[in-house]
Amino acid sequence: MSVEPVPRREVVTRSPRRSRRTVAGVPLAADDGAAPGAVQLRSLMRSQLRSSLVSFAVLAVPTGVLPLVLALATPSTGWLSGPSLAWIILGFAGYPPLVLLAWWYVRRAERHEKDFARLVKGG
């Protein structure tokens, strides 16, 4: 009579690690080292960093000039001066450029990811 060996017990403490990552729906091998995929990924990160720095600069310049604009809105006669003008500038004038800047940034980020995915797939 042969005795079947008892399977070794295994303790599971976490989900198994996957050997592949995905960026923008494109699989990247984790063990490629300095493969072309890593170079392309660095290029994607640089282009997204460049877009974020441009959008930050475009946002920082008007925000930095805003105290000067509000200081020049000195009180005088009329409803469109002093505090009324300051409230219009603070409450309404800043939002349309902010929304346009956010729209531009999202479009650029999506374009960078599409270019990256096309480059990695080889198409």
Image (tube, rainbow, N blue to C red):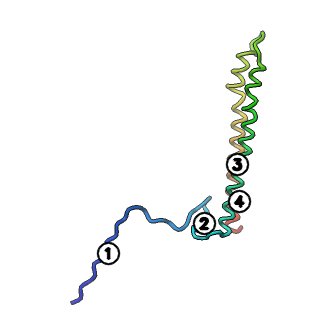
- Where, by quadrant of the figure, is residue 100 drawn? top right
- Residue at horizontal 57 percent and vertical 70 percent from the top: 31
Which callout, 3 or 4, points at the residue further toward the start of the chain?
A: 4
The residue carrying pointer 4 sits among few (fewer than 14), some (14 to 19) or many (20 or more) residues within 10 Å by Cα, namely some
The residue carrying pointer 3 sits among few (fewer than 14), some (14 to 19) or many (20 or more) residues within 10 Å by Cα, namely few
- Residue type of the residue flagged with mark 1: Arg
- Where, by quadrant of the figure, is residue 6 drawn? bottom left
Residue 8 shows which numbered tag? 1
- Measure the alpha-carbon separation of dots 1 and 2: 33 Å
Residue 107 shows which numbered tag? 3
Q: Which residue is mark 2?
A: 28
Element carrying mark 3: helix
- Locate residue 54, reporting x and y percent: 74, 45
- Residue at horizontal 69 percent and vertical 32 percent from the top: 95
- Residue at horizontal 69 percent and vertical 21 percent from the top: 87
Q: Quadrant of the C terminus?
A: bottom right
- Residue type of the residue flagged with mark 3: Arg
Which callout, 1 or 2, points at the residue further toward the start of the chain?
A: 1
- Locate residue 65, reporting x and y percent: 76, 30
- Measure the alpha-carbon separation of dots 3 and 4: 18 Å
Which callout, 2 or 3, points at the residue further toward the start of the chain?
A: 2
- Measure the alpha-carbon separation of dots 2 and 4: 14 Å
Which callout, 3 or 1, points at the residue further toward the start of the chain?
A: 1
Which callout, 2 or 4, points at the residue further toward the start of the chain?
A: 2
